[in-house]
Image (cartoon, helix red, strand yellow):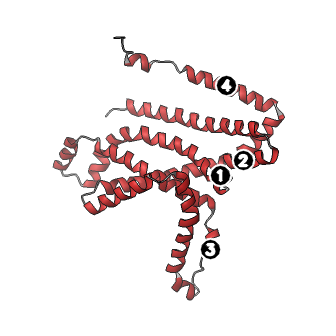
Amino acid sequence: MAPQPSLRHEKDDRPWWLAVLVLIGLILAVVIVANDIYAQVFRTVVNGAGITVFVTLVAFMLATVLGLGIALLGLSDSIVLRQIARFYIEIIRGIPILVLLFYIAFVGAPGLVAAYNFIITPLVQAGIAEPILVRDLSLMWRAIIALMIGYSSFIAEIFRAGFQSVDIGQIEAAKSLGLSRYRRFRLVVFPQAIRVIFPPLSNDFVSMVKDSSLVSVLGVADITQMGKVYASGSFRFFETYSIVTYIYLILTIGLSLALRRIEKKMKQMPR
């Protein structure tokens, strides 16, 4: 049997792949600067980077909060709450993000507006409040809500697995010390679980950067939408989508490297 590579060898493996990517990135950067067509495409497409970053950050933060809440429901002592959490997770995980995006944008949003207007009917009749229209809820926020709901089910499972990875003996020891449930969670469970939670959670963050491109189907002016508009008007599909790919790779690879460094520092922290 061939000898297996040691963990030390894997740990000290030099990131030659990163050097190659950096070299390719620098070459493409020179091409963008030197070529007027690529430069024009880049200036147009990069205008959508702010929307992409905003949608990703807001949707992921909301999804993390919602996912944490669903995970805590799934770990509660009440069977009703556990079943509600499991029902939510299984239903949402079974719906493709794109389908969920359309459903929230064109079914959920009108339903939410109708429910809101129904609730405030007495206030409207009294002249205190004004009813809202569906168009008042922007397509960007509909997309953010859809991404939040779609990712919250996966994040809930990440939190659940992380919390359950903590040794039950430590939790029992915390109980014997008289710590309340909240203090057990804050002082014992969460600090240990975060080491298990962070890697898959960071992977979902990177995935959301890519899935944020789906908001372009609603006409939200992100990187992908700006590229679609430019390509359809100029018919320069190769140049446009090469630049779109280039920008997404900068975002995702840069983010992955930063998160990997944070993960490495967390592993070096004393338990």
Q: How far apart are marks 4 and 1 (CA)?
A: 27 Å
Amino acid type at circle 2 is Lys
Task: Determine which residue is flagged by label 2.
Answer: 228
Q: How far apart are marks 2 and 3 (CA)?
A: 29 Å
Task: Determine which residue is flagged by label 3.
Answer: 133
**Quadrant of the image containing the C terminus:** top left
- Marked residue nearer the N-terminal end (2 or 1): 1
Which residue is found at the position 79% from the left and 40% from the top?
236
- Marked residue nearer the N-terminal end (4 or 1): 4
Q: Are the residues at dot 2 and dot 1 in contact (C-beta closer than 8 Å)?
A: yes
Which residue is found at the position 30% from the left and 61% from the top?
81
Q: How far apart are marks 4 and 2 (CA)?
A: 24 Å
Number of residues whose C-alpha sits closer than 10 Å to that of mark 4, classed few (under 14), some (14–19) or many (20 or more): few
Nearer to us of marks 4 and 2 is 2
Tag 2, which secondary structure?
helix
Number of residues whose C-alpha sits closer than 10 Å to that of mark 2, classed few (under 14), some (14–19) or many (20 or more): many
- Marked residue nearer the N-terminal end (4 or 3): 4
Q: In this view, does 226 lie to the left or right of 91?
A: right
Nearer to us of marks 1 and 3 is 1
Q: How far apart are marks 1 and 3 (CA)?
A: 22 Å
Q: In this view, does 232 lie to the left or right of 83?
A: right
107 above or below 116?
above
Q: How far apart are marks 2 and 1 (CA)?
A: 9 Å
106 above or below 133?
above
**Percent coordinates x, y for residue 237 in the rendering:** 75, 40
Which residue is found at the position 16% from the left and 48% from the top?
176
Number of residues whose C-alpha sits closer than 10 Å to that of mark 1, classed few (under 14), some (14–19) or many (20 or more): many
Tag 3, which secondary structure?
loop
